[in-house]
Image (tube, rainbow, N blue to C red):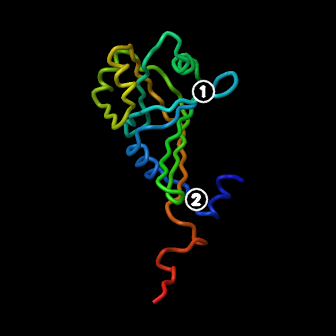
Amino acid sequence: MTVDELDDYGMLQMDGEDIERTLERKSVGVLGLPTGSVPLLRPLSFWYDGESALYFVYVLGADSQKVTVSDQADVAGFLVYDIETTFNWRSVLLTGTVERVPDGERAAIEERIDTDWKPDLFERAAESEATALYRFQIQDRSGIKQLERPPELGTESSTSRPD
């Protein structure tokens, strides 16, 4: 079944404004990077610049697969989703490129970054380990959502109550 065929079941395509609001509200998603076999998927905290890019802080390590694959990738995907209930959810899929931000640009960008949430473990590691700032340049965006109960389930107000 295609995404378009799910429209009959209550799924809606998100418009650009709705996608923007979702990116501004959320701060965690899943980065997908191509490899020779299975894609590398990593949950990441992000900051959206309000225009065309997401930013991630990577804690560097001697053998970081995420850094190696990010530095080699020609294309990447990023998934941001929000699930409140089985009838109220949204999902935004971004495609683009990922690159390390040059040291000369890093300070100016980091002054603007507002990270609402990131795991404490990575926060503590970043205090003593080397980090790098990466930019995900958005080339394409799409989104789907469902924001109400399907009609066949009725509404609470249509439920009859005994007198």
Which residue is disc 1 drawn over?
40
How packed mark 1 is, by other alpha carbons closer than 10 Å (few <14, some 14-19, many 20 or more), is: some
**Which of the two marks, 2 or 1, is nearer to us in this view?**
1
Considering depth in this image, is 5 or 53 the residue closer to the camera? 5
**Three-letter code for the amino acid on which mark 1 is drawn:** Leu
Residue at 38%, 34% in the rendered image? 47
How packed mark 2 is, by other alpha carbons closer than 10 Å (few <14, some 14-19, many 20 or more), is: many
Furthest residue in direction left, as rendered? 111
| Mark 2–mark 1 distance (CA, rounded to whole Å) | 28 Å
User: Residue 11, which numbered label?
Assistant: 2
Q: Is residue 114 above or below residue 67?
A: below
Considering depth in this image, is 162 or 160 the residue closer to the camera? 162
Where residue 138 sits in the image (x, y, percent)? 49, 35
Q: Secondary structure at mark 2?
A: loop
Q: Are marks 2 and 1 in contact (CB under 8 Å)?
A: no
Q: Is residue 155 above or below residue 44?
A: below
| In the displayed structure image, the side of residue 9 where residue 50 appears, left or right | left
Q: Is residue 152 above or below residue 14?
A: below
Residue at 65%, 53% in the rendered image? 3
